């Protein structure tokens, strides 16, 4: 490899003779059908520096790669050009092949004549010319390439998990049990997410709390987990293996370490009766200014709501809560928001979902007819620890004679969300089953298509069918208080086509339940930007590949778990959370990651120390050596965008693989017209 | 404010009272209107049923004339309002349709470049003139008058943008501004059946019966509407309905007639005598 | 006639071009995307009188059962209130599809006898084509003359009421630019003639 | 100067240089390929990691080397893989546009587009539009009049971040 060292020293291709091998791929007929590959290969032969030029059926196949390796050895090639599919697909393949043959992998350059030529054109002659010109640019460029080495950086073994729903809880525990340090950040006052609000879980009907709360307290007590509730991630810097994260911890006006969760303060609060909307119970009950979301909340620590607390609002209050707290002295009304800076190597994003706002579907009369509920509200109503102690009653405290469950509310609907939310059919069946068990009511399910795909789901559907729940295949058109018959008087009336019967039905109900769909969190876009991820069109976070990399994101070291990636039920969420944890562990246990060498560097003798570049760098990778009065770039922090290179007035900053001379040469040669 | 007034066939025929009450009310609010020169039938629903492209060309003639007049078009009839707006939309959204229509207009020595706004009086009154201005103009508030506001179908759907499609409120607010009491009426936007009253009366009359019955059940003294066909259907067949089903007699008037009354314009000038079910009894004492 | 009517349909009864022909009409392109949820039938105030609900008409039209569709009373009961169109979760313009089917039924002259609506539509069409405007009571009169004398008598009382309240026009209204109108409607007159073909049947 | 008076005979095809960022637009171009979206064959795509890397020198050099149009593609504002490289590109682009029009190069010959990784169809649309526009304008043929230009470019270089001397020498160096 002596000639490499030699090269690196004198910068460009100067001394030793450039010997280029060119390989034009047929990709079966994908390229060959629209590009005359033989002609292209022949054309390349006569270009300066080219020693040999071949066309081959499948360059990416083992024999194809072997061919390159052989030629490097036999013909002393020191540059390789592959014209095939997109470099985003196979660049690493051919770099590795080059490397295996003992040549520095960055002497290989790859160009796409498939995605950018044969697949997008129909004029074979023009397409062949285009391929030649693209190749010409690559050949001219590769001559100027240098030997480069990938930098290795250690992976910080600590992991950040964002969002404390069942997905975040499961990944955090998996990682912590593997002995890794985990920071779990939750925006709410407690972890548990949506699952903590459910009463039972389909299809097994075991109680949500019984499965979830042990995991929640395990998080609380695990020595490897630092739990920050009432907190948000506000800034993320760095790169795979070395993320720098800033977490904002909102004041809860309680010292978490001193509060024992006795709730004496809540009893003692100057507000004798709870009078403020209880978010956890979906506004179906009231809470006091000092409260705990629900009895098994983790951490079991009260929180003070500054918007309603007299002390915090007016400063004037007897502060009976503080008296009640007494010796424990957990109250701290001076508390301000504070920021924590942490270093982690990987991140798992599990920020969850929100349910559709049913106000968007006016014909269902949510917010107009008091007896129209969302499924989540019913989860609370039917929950033993809920506002009615588990008794399903109307606002008039009567047991309903007839309950209607409407599927696909805000799903499969172009006016709201186009997608199927995947969980509504099953949780509607669950609710139907539970309402049957709790009341003597007639229960109706109005569905478009029944989707019970999952282990034990179809069986559960059959069970509910046999329990005598009414199933009407049809999307309810309207929920009105317009009565036509005596039995309809004073009740809600659903108008729907029974599409299997082929006629329209009017069905009176005392309670109507809207099976609202799942959609992305309102701030998903901000989170996406903060972690440098992408979203699919509907706004859920986009996995790198649906089949090959389902929990990865375009940014290395950042993984996805749960419904923030798309609607998911609990079993799928937990499975995905485990997968995300495993991906993180794989990185951590390998111990290091390799960083592409396409970073920027300063040619000291040419730098005038003007500082233009420093403000350009989004990663603060550039500093100024005040002694030498020159710019200095930290290669570990540089991500290789090249913005500083373009900005440098003296042209003294260069970017590996994208030096001005390399890019300009490529530009000029692709512009030379071939015939 | 100045508008090209597009009456449509009904306001010159069975819906005369609408025109008779609309014009003085607009005048009272200093809204200037000029009847669109030699306007033609919008085509309504029947034309679409025979030949879509002809229907669009037909109503495009009105748009072309209006464009020359340079004023926004005021279309009080729901059908006209819908058809004109639909025509605009289709000319714009379907290049093929647009081409055909423009060609046809050219053959007829006309042109339309798409710069016409079609508005409904209710939109103008509630959103442009504003309820406060209207309140100021009220001389004889309709205190104690229980009104069911019936919008019908084509004014709220699908090309109208000035009110909530599922639960329109513009006319309710207007009636309250006049001092009247708006009763709960869940059938506000339920179709009256259009021409079915004449063609398939078993069906048509049933639809009308349901509308009247619900209004009465909710304690309405009077039903107010903004569509000549709705008014005709609800007003003209009440004796047949009485003989078929039961007595749901309720007078049906245009919202502009109630505005006129509240503004203190003499009854005689508001076409109230044209009602087949006389409105006077319901209004007696309240106005 | 036997009380047992065969309900089976054979593939040979499908017109495989039918759906495409309907979808070629502006506004009808989304026919194929229907998920058969029945919202249209649910909101329709007239679906309860239809022999096929609007949803089923979409289903049959898409499958190419042309005769079932064109001879149904559904398309003629549609009063164009557009409720289905605004509520359809797939944004299918069902009202426009109904129009397209009406046009086709008139064109092929296969619509149900005993339903005067096609006749009304045609008479309306012709009156407007001639005069540029309709005079409602004249239209009604012509309609009853062509369809149902009895109805005429039933409605007689109404006529008198209209006369009494001055809502009856004795003269037929028309526009000045009738020549212009003719020119406007001439060029693509193929459909118009087809309308009058429909009339002949 | 009006190039259209020297309208080319029949088969003149414009030559457009595209510089696409690796993460959004280049990926979108791949997507267009995978989705078999047909578009004009006149564009030659060069890849950089970020539109922020695009030195106005690249554009000027492309024109000087016979490009009839230059297209730059980057991520949508706010979506830059490198946080804000595309904003830098936008700033330079604005300056560059003014310069090009001073040089008498019609503004339709230079275009900056935000195209996300999901917008293969936009790649197709933009390339077709631009090809049509440039076709309509006719050949730019700078190399033909390169000498007259050299001076002017040098001056313009100067205006550009005061890059001046180095760039010209550098321009010569690369145009060996």
Image (spheres, coloured by chain):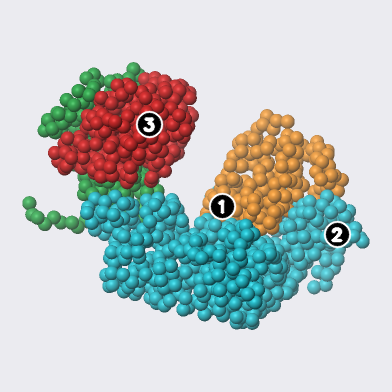
Chain colours: A cyan, B red, C green, D orange
Looking at the picture, does residue A259 appear above or below residue A127?
A: below
Residue C128's spot in the image, x, y percent?
29, 26
Q: Residue furthest left?
A: C1
Q: Nearer the viewer, mark 1 or mark 2?
A: 2
Q: Are marks 2 and 3 in contact (CB under 8 Å)?
A: no
Residue A208's spot in the image, x, y percent?
45, 75
Q: How crowded is the residue under tag 3: few (<14 C-alpha within 10 Å), some, or many (20+)?
A: many
Quadrant including the N terminus of chain A:
bottom right
Q: Which mark is residue A624?
A: 2
Question: Image quadrant of residue A155?
Answer: bottom right
Residue carrying label 3: B141
Q: Are marks 1 and 2 in contact (CB under 8 Å)?
A: no
Q: Which mark is residue A648?
A: none
Q: Residue at point 36% right, 67% down?
A: A392
- Give the side of residue A179 with respect to residue D38, left or right: right
Question: Image quadrant of residue B185?
Answer: top left
Q: Chain of mark 3?
A: B
Query: What whole-number distance in Å separates the C-alpha atoms at marks 2 and 3?
Result: 80 Å
């Amino acid at each position: 490899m002596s000639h490499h060292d030699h090269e690196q020293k004198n910068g460009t291709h100067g001394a030793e003779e450039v010997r280029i091998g060119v390989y034009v791929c047929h990709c079966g007929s994908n390229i060959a059908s629209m590009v005359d590959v033989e002609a292209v290969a022949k054309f390349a032969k006569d270009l300066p520096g080219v020693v040999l030029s071949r066309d081959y059926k499948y360059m990416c196949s083992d024999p194809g790669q072997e061919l390159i390796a052989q030629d490097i050895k036999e013909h002393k090639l020191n540059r390789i050009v592959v014209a095939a599919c997109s470099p985003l697909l196979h660049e690493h393949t051919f770099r590795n092949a080059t490397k295996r043959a003992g040549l520095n992998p960055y002497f290989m350059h790859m160009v796409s004549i498939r995605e950018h030529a044969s697949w997008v054109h129909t004029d074979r002659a023009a397409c062949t010319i285009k391929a030649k010109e693209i190749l010409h640019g690559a050949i001219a460029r590769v001559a100027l390439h240098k030997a480069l080495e990938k930098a290795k950086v250690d992976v910080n073994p600590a992991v950040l998990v964002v969002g404390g729903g069942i997905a975040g809880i499961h990944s955090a525990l998996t990682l912590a049990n593997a002995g890794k340090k985990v920071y779990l950040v939750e925006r709410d006052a407690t972890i548990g997410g949506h699952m903590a609000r459910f009463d039972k879980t389909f299809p097994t009907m075991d109680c949500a709390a019984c499965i979830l709360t042990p995991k929640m307290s395990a998080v609380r007590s695990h020595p490897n987990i630092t739990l920050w509730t009432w907190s948000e991630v506000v800034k993320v810097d760095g790169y795979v293996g070395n993320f720098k994260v800033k977490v904002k911890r909102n004041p809860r006006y309680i010292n978490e370490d001193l509060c024992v969760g006795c709730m004496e303060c809540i009893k003692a609060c100057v507000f004798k009766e709870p009078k403020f909307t209880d978010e956890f119970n979906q506004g179906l009950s009231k809470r006091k200014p000092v409260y705990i979301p629900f009895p098994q909340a983790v951490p079991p620590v009260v929180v003070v709501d500054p918007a309603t607390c007299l002390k915090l609002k007016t400063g004037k209050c007897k502060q009976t809560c503080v008296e009640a707290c007494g010796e424990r002295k957990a109250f701290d009304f001076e508390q301000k928001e504070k920021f924590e800076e942490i270093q982690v190597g990987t991140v798992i994003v599990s920020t969850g979902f929100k349910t559709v706002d049913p106000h968007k579907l006016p014909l269902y009369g949510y917010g107009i007819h008091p007896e129209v509920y969302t499924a989540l509200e019913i989860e609370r109503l039917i929950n033993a620890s809920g506002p009615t102690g588990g008794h399903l009653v109307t606002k008039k405290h009567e047991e309903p004679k007839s309950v209607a469950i409407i599927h696909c509310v805000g799903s499969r609907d172009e006016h709201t969300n186009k997608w199927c939310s995947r969980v509504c059919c099953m949780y509607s069946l669950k609710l139907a089953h539970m309402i049957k068990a709790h009341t003597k009511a007639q229960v109706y399910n109005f569905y478009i298509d029944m989707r019970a795909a999952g282990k034990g789901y179809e069986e559960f559907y059959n069970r509910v069918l046999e329990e005598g729940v009414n199933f009407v295949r049809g999307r309810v058109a309207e929920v009105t208080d317009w009565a036509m018959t005596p039995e309809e008087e004073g009740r809600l009336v659903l108008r729907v086509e029974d599409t299997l019967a082929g006629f329209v039905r009017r069905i009176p109900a005392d309670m109507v339940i809207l099976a609202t769909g799942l959609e992305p969190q309102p701030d998903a876009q901000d989170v996406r930007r903060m972690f440098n991820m992408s979203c699919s069109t509907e706004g859920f976070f986009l996995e790198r590949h649906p089949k090959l990399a389902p929990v990865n994101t375009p940014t290395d070291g950042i993984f996805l778990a749960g419904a923030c990636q798309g609607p998911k039920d609990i079993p799928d969420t937990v499975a995905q959370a485990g997968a995300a944890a495993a991906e993180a562990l794989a990185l951590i246990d390998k111990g290091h990651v390799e960083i592409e060498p396409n970073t920027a560097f300063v040619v000291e003798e040419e730098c005038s120390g003007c500082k233009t570049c420093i403000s350009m760098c989004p990663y603060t990778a550039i500093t100024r050596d005040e002694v030498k009065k020159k710019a200095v770039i930290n290669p570990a922090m540089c991500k290789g965008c090249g913005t500083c290179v373009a900005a440098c007035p003296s042209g003294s900053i260069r970017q590996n693989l994208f030096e001005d001379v390399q890019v300009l040469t490529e530009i000029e040669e692709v512009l030379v017209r071939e015939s | 404010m100045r508008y090209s007034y597009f009456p449509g066939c009904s306001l010159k025929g069975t819906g005369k009272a609408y025109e008779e009450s609309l014009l003085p009310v607009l005048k009272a609010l200093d809204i200037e209107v000029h009847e669109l020169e030699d306007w033609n039938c919008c085509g309504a629903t029947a034309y679409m049923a025979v030949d879509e492209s002809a229907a669009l060309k037909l109503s495009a003639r009105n748009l072309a004339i209006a464009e020359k007049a340079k004023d926004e078009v005021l279309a009080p009839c729901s059908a006209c309002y819908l058809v004109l707006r639909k025509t605009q939309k289709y000319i714009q959204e379907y290049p093929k349709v647009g081409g055909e229509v423009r060609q046809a207009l050219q053959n007829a020595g006309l042109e339309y470049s798409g710069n016409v706004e079609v508005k409904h009086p209710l939109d103008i009154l509630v959103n442009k003139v504003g309820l406060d201005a209207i309140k100021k103009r009220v001389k004889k508030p309709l205190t104690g008058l229980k009104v069911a506001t019936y919008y019908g179908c084509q004014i709220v759907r699908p090309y109208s943008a000035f009110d909530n499609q599922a639960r329109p409120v513009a006319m309710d607010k207007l009636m309250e501004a006049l001092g009247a009491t708006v009763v709960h009426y869940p059938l506000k936007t339920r179709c009256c059946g259009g021409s079915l009253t004449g063609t398939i009366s078993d069906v048509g009359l049933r639809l009308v019966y349901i509308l009247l019955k619900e209004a009465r059940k909710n304690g309405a003294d009077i039903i107010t509407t903004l569509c000549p066909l709705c008014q005709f259907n609800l007003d003209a067949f009440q004796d047949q309905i009485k003989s078929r089903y039961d007595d749901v007699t309720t007078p049906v008037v245009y919202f502009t007639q109630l505005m006129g009354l509240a503004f203190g314009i003499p009854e005689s000038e508001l076409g109230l005598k044209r009602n087949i079910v006389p409105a006077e009894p319901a209004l007696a004492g309240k106005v | 006639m036997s009380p047992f009517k065969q309900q089976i349909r054979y593939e040979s009864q499908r017109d495989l071009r039918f759906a495409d022909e309907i979808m070629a009409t502006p506004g009808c392109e989304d026919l194929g995307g229907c998920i058969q949820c029945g919202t249209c039938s649910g909101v329709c105030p007239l679906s309860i009188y239809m022999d096929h609900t609007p949803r089923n008409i979409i289903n049959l039209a898409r499958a190419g059962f042309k005769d079932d569709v064109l001879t149904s009373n559904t398309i003629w009961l549609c009063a164009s209130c557009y409720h289905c169109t605004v509520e359809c979760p797939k944004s299918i313009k069902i009202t426009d599809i109904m129009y397209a089917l009406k046009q086709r039924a008139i064109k092929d002259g296969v619509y149900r006898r005993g339903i005067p609506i096609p006749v009304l539509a045609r008479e309306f069409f012709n009156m407007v084509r001639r005069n540029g405007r309709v005079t409602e009571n004249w239209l009604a009169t012509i309609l009853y003359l062509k369809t149902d004398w009895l109805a005429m008598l039933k409605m007689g009382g109404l006529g008198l009421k209209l006369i009494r309240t001055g809502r009856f026009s004795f003269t037929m209204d028309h526009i000045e630019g009738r020549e212009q109108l003719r020119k406007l409607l001439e060029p693509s007159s193929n459909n118009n003639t087809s309308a009058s073909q429909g009339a002949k049947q | 100067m009006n190039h259209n008076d020297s309208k080319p005979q029949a088969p003149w095809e414009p030559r457009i240089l595209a510089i696409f960022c690796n993460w959004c637009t280049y990926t979108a171009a791949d997507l267009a390929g995978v989705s078999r979206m047909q578009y004009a064959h006149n564009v030659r795509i060069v890849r950089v990691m970020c539109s922020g890397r695009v030195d106005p020198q690249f554009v000027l050099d492309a024109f000087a080397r016979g490009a009839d149009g230059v297209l730059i593609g980057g991520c949508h504002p706010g979506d830059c893989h490198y946080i804000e490289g595309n904003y830098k590109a936008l700033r330079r682009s604005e300056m560059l546009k003014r310069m090009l029009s001073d040089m008498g190069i019609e503004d339709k010959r230079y275009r900056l587009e935000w195209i996300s990784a999901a917008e293969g169809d936009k790649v197709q649309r933009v390339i077709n539009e631009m090809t049509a526009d440039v076709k309509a304008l006719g050949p730019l043929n700078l190399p033909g009049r390169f000498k007259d230009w050299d001076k002017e470019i040098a001056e313009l270089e100067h205006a550009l971040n005061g890059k001046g001397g180095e760039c010209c020498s550098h321009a010569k160096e690369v145009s060996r």
